Amino acid sequence: MFVFIKSFVFYLYIMRISLLSLHLLIVFHTVHSQSGSGSLARQKDIGDIFVPASDDVSGTLQIRKLYIPVLPIIGYAPANGFVVGVGLAPAILLDSIQHTHLSTLQTNLQFTSRNQKNIHLRHNIYTSRDRFIFQGDWRLLFFSQPTYGLGIYDYPPVFSLLGLSADDNNGAQPMRFNYLRVYETILRKVTKRFYLGAGIALDYHWNIRDEMLQLDSATAFITSHYAYSELENYSAQKYSANGILLRAVYDTRDNSVHAYSGAYLDMAYRRNTLWLGSDQSSSLLYLEARKYFTVVSDKQQLAFWFIGNFILEGNLPYLALPSIGWDTYNRSGRGFVQGRFRGRNMVYGEAEWRFSLSESGLLGGVVYLNTTSTDNKFTDQSLGDRFAIGYGTGLRIKMTKETRTNICIDLGAGSDGSTGIWFGLSETF
């Protein structure tokens, strides 16, 4: 508990510094924009470029109308290489916007230059008057990705197992694996903004291949994944972590796609059990908090994000351990490659300034700063001993003004010298 408090206090310190920095930028931007601002122009999105907008300038959502933004995926991501595919982000309002949140679904099919084939399906469905929320994260990945050991290191050391060791290749250890994730939760409204619910969480990795693993004594190289699996009694070829979820959610956001104000709090307890197919039993605690502030009408916002993952009991297989970039929408850790930091426990925080670049709202931008800490019991590195810092900026292009859905293009860098570009639909958090 002391380590958690220590980590959280350090996180608040980092967020305080970032907030002061962002405040200076906001003051400059506000003075500049007010000096030549007139009345707000009609809100526009990409569709208005090709089809003239109607006289309805409010961008009001219509009840039970299905909005289906379709986006061809042509881009690049550090974990995937060059990516082609198609993405859909349907949204629908099932009752009045005064008392019902917008229901959303994101799905995409991707093929990458690194011979990956990825299918994602995430949904967040609010029934009338938000009586029930159905949340899901389903994935089928035929994937490749380097891992970098546990903890926060510039070049993390590999394990030494049975006296065998080798150079760490700057920390990167390429792997290929197949992965099935099925997370599904049903939440029931208890009070106006508070929900309780339960669900399932299934993680299955198979056909795992450590591309640098060498067991021959003459050319031995023991990877972090193989050593961890041996030490914690997991198969190095396949494993499962399947459990039940108990969740509590508090949600006051004004929009679930792109919030201008409000807060989102999520606490989940997960129990992985043998009878659901887990290789080992374990208990986990997940905490998430988001807070949004409107600074200048709908033109500027400040957003803050915190995630905490903690193993309370037992162990998890290596690829199921908490890691950056493996949250629901793969958005944490901009500035670093997905999976760059991993550990039994992890805390993550991010601050973002969001602002308009055009009076119509068609173009916008963001500036962000994030920090991550994980642990490594094999090197006695505790949670909060060291933090990695990521930072960057991004462009936003309004895809659907009624739902506030944006096309996101972010440039980022990390404290380990890494850089990258990230593409996505909807805001990072």
Image (spheres, rainbow, N blue to C red):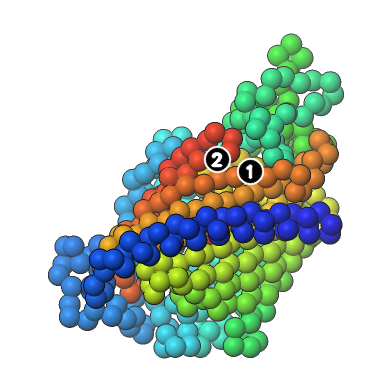
Q: Position of residue 89 (x, y in %)?
A: 39, 64
Give the Cα distance between marks 1 and 2: 7 Å
Residue 391 makes an appearance in the image: yes
Tell me which amino acid carries mark 1: Ala
* Quadrant assignment for the N terminus: bottom right
- The residue that appears at 41% across and 35% down in the rendered structure is 113
Q: Crowdedness of circle 1 by 10 Å Cα count: few (<14), some, many (20+)?
A: many
Q: Position of residue 185 (x, y in %)?
A: 62, 71
Residue that protrudes farthest toward the top in the picture: 218
Q: Position of residue 169 (x, y in %)?
A: 63, 23
Q: Position of residue 47 (x, y in %)?
A: 22, 65
Note whether 16 is above or below 176 in the view shown: below
Mark 2: secondary structure: strand
Residue picked out by circle 2: 414
Q: Is residue 129 left or right of residue 111?
A: right
Q: Nearer the viewer, residue 108 or 257?
A: 257
Residue picked out by circle 1: 388
Instruction: Give whichever of discs 1 and 2 has the lower sequence position.
Output: 1
- The residue that appears at 20% across and 67% down in the rendered structure is 48
Q: Crowdedness of circle 2 by 10 Å Cα count: few (<14), some, many (20+)?
A: many
- Number of labels in the image equals 2
- The residue that appears at 69% across and 72% down in the rendered structure is 247
Tell me which amino acid carries mark 2: Gly
Q: Nearer the viewer, residue 173 or 11?
A: 11
Q: Are marks 1 and 2 in contact (CB under 8 Å)?
A: yes
Residue 202 makes an appearance in the image: no
